[in-house]
Amino acid sequence: MSVFTNPTSLAKEHAAEYVAAVFRLLGEQDPLDVLERTPALLKNAVTPLSVEQVRRPEQAGKWSVRDVVQHLADSELVSAVRVRMVLAQNHAPLVAYDQDVWAERLRYSQADAARALEEFTLVRRSNLRLLRSLATDDWARVGVHVERGEQTLADMVRLSAGHDLVHLNQIDRILGSASSTGQC
């Protein structure tokens, strides 16, 4: 199992390992630049795909491109709330969520990838507008994540940018697995 596969049942035990791996993936890249580029990269990856390509999972039991895009849209909503909570409250509590339960119960299998991409892009634009307006002191504000403990807003944004990279790589893998089996 990949360090980026972080099932809720093991999330607390693997939180530090997951965060470190995501930060390594981000490296020295500016998180705001990564966050800004992601919508266009997603659009370039998803737009030329057929409905079948968007729906085809990497392998049985894994997510499809559609599922990843819907997950990113939902994650961006969660990030929007978390960022605002940290900015507005001292040591704001930050809830976790089980991405696999969301995928099931929020019916990712019925999602429209183009619509999910539009929603993601709109919320991301709003989040970036807010983040780019912050004062230096704001980046040091702290929220308390139920699995990861205290996190500064700066680290939360780095984690979001790295999360984008994880899922952009996942989409590349999904499309690569389809092309290697002649399914594209």
Image (spheres, rainbow, N blue to C red):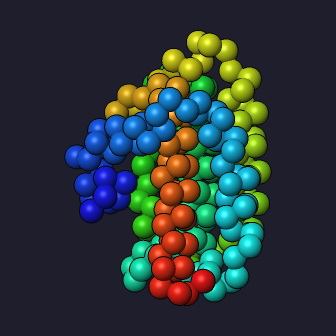
Residue displayed at 63% across by 86% down: 52
Considering every residue shown, the one lying at the far left of the view is 13
Residue displayed at 74% across by 73% down: 48
User: Considering only vertical position in the picture, is 141 above or below 64?
Assistant: above
Residue displayed at 69% across by 44% down: 37
User: Considering only vertical position in the picture, is 49 above or below 125?
Assistant: below
Indicate left or right for 128 with 158 as reference. right
Q: Is residue 74 visible?
A: no
Q: Nearer the viewer, residue 145 or 4?
A: 4
Q: Nearer the viewer, residue 93 or 12?
A: 12
Indicate left or right for 84 with 44 as reference. left
Q: Nearer the viewer, residue 80 or 118?
A: 118
Query: How far across and how far down the image is residue 113, in percent?
Result: 68, 71
Q: Is residue 100 visible?
A: yes
Q: How many marks?
A: 0
Quadrant location of the N terminus in the rendered image: bottom left
Quadrant location of the C terminus in the rendered image: bottom right
Residue displayed at 66% across by 35% down: 33
Considering every residue shown, the one lying at the far top of the view is 137
User: Considering only vertical position in the picture, is 45 above or below 50?
Assistant: above
Q: Quadrant of residue 112?
A: bottom right
Q: Quadrant of residue 61?
A: bottom left
Query: How far across and how far down the image is residue 40, in percent?
Result: 73, 53
Query: How far across and how far down the image is residue 67, in percent?
Result: 55, 70
User: Considering only vertical position in the picture, is 152 above or below 13?
Assistant: above
Query: How far across and how far down the image is residue 122, in percent?
Result: 77, 51
